[in-house]
């Protein structure tokens, strides 16, 4: 029987264990997938610990993105055949060897991607696209400042920003992460949390103010980043693993700037047609080789606790992946 990472209460990785999944028959419109790889993000671990802003029901199996092979088709399905390689995303349930999902939630693995790359592609790149295109309205020639550029959504934002024609400045905490950002297409990199951080931003932008800030970090990095914005600038709030920032409200007024929330989960729920259109576009670009995630390390499924701890630390440059089978 297939196994899954499950716990009866929220907590750190040590409270989770591998359990066998009960088998069930498919309903109409569903597809059974043998999972080959699952991505682990900071949000996955945060949710598993019960510290995310929305708590899923218990018992809980973490995992929001994965890739695998179609093994069974329910009545009325027509988009896929047995043996097709597919990518999936969901609200938990994918740290497992098998998943049953509605057919419409699956996409074909982009050409040229292996299972590990495909598993970590949809969520971070869909988030970056929604943030920069829909919420930030980033235009060619504008300057984009990406915080946390070595992380999942940060690295995606660098690639999406370059594709949209922006000048991209990437802020990252380690030399390895800054090298990853340059490889992803950043025009300049700066050292996160450096004492002269704002001066580095000015030098990287040739003294011009920033048009858009992509902020998946929060905490102490939000205020100085907002202060780098020019007139009409947009500060995109993606997440806040560094803590919830306190921003002085006179700053948006003086700069004519906007603080813009980016919630990819609610976007998918409340605007499904637009969300599907965005996903179709990022998958098209991935098949052309324009967008591609970077993998830091793959762990065997049985080492899920170590993998979750690595993802939670934020130390790795690139994505952490569980591999099954």
Image (cartoon, helix red, strand yellow):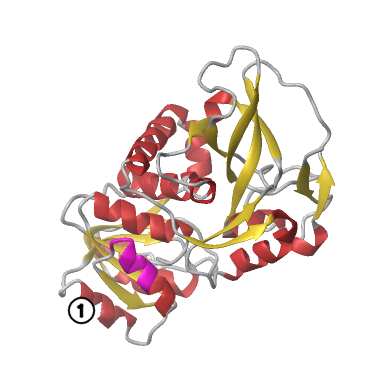
Q: Residues within 10 Å of mark 1 (few under 14, many from 20)?
A: few
Q: Residue at x 50, y 20 (%)?
A: 79
Quadrant of the rendered image containing residue 225: bottom left
Q: Nearer the viewer, residue 61 or 307?
A: 307
Residue 59 vertical position relative to residue 305 in the rendered view, above or below: above
Q: Residue furthest top?
A: 76
Whole-percent x, y for residue 227 in the image: 31, 71
Q: Residue at x 75, y 57 (%)?
A: 302
Whole-percent x, y for residue 111 in the image: 40, 39
Residue 218 vertical position relative to residue 193 in the rendered view, above or below: above
Q: Which element carries disc 1, helix, strand or loop?
A: helix
Q: Which residue is mark 1?
A: 203
Q: Residue at x 84, y 34 (%)?
A: 22
Residue 192 vertical position relative to residue 159 in the rendered view, above or below: below
Q: Nearer the viewer, residue 111 or 53?
A: 111
Whole-percent x, y for residue 235 in the image: 35, 59
| Left or right of 135, for residue 102 | right
Q: Residue furthest bottom?
A: 195
Q: For the stretch drawn in magenta, what is the main secondary structure?
A: helix
Quadrant of the rendered image containing residue 285: top left
Verify whether residue 111 appears in magenta: no
| Left or right of 197, for residue 82 | right
| Image: magenta residue range | 179-185
Q: Residue at x 39, y 55 (%)?
A: 156
Whole-percent x, y for residue 25 in the image: 77, 21
| Left or right of 280, for residue 1 | right
Residue 250 visible in the displayed image: no
């Amino acid at each position: 029987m297939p196994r899954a990472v499950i716990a009866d209460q929220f907590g750190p990785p040590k409270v989770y264990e591998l359990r066998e999944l009960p088998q069930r028959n498919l309903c109409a419109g569903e597809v059974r997938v043998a999972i080959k790889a699952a991505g682990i993000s900071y949000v996955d671990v945060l949710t598993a610990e019960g510290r995310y802003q929305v708590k899923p029901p218990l018992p809980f199996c973490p995992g929001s993105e994965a890739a695998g092979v179609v093994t069974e088709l329910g009545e009325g399905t027509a988009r896929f055949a047995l043996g097709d390689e597919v990518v999936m995303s969901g609200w938990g349930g994918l740290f497992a060897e098998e998943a049953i999902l509605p057919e419409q939630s699956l996409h074909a693995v982009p050409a040229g991607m292996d299972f590990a790359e495909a598993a970590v592609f949809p969520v971070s790149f869909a988030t970056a696209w929604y943030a920069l295109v829909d919420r930030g309205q980033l235009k060619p020639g504008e300057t984009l400042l990406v915080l946390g550029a070595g992380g999942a959504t940060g690295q995606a934002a660098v690639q999406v920003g370059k594709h949209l024609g922006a000048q991209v400045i990437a802020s990252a905490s380690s030399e390895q992460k800054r090298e990853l950002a340059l490889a992803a297409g950043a025009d300049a990199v700066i050292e996160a949390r450096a004492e002269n951080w704002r001066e580095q931003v000015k030098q990287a932008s040739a003294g011009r103010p920033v048009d858009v800030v992509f902020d998946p970090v929060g905490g102490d990095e939000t205020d100085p980043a907002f202060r780098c914005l020019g007139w009409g600038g947009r500060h995109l709030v993606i997440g806040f693993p560094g803590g919830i920032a306190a921003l002085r409200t006179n700053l948006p007024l003086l700069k004519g700037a906007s603080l813009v929330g980016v919630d990819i989960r609610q976007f998918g729920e409340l605007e499904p047609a637009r969300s599907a259109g965005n996903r179709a576009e990022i998958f098209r670009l991935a098949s052309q080789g324009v967008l591609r995630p970077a993998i830091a390390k793959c762990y065997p499924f049985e080492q899920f606790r170590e993998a979750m701890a690595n993802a939670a630390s934020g130390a790795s440059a690139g994505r952490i992946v569980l591999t099954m089978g």
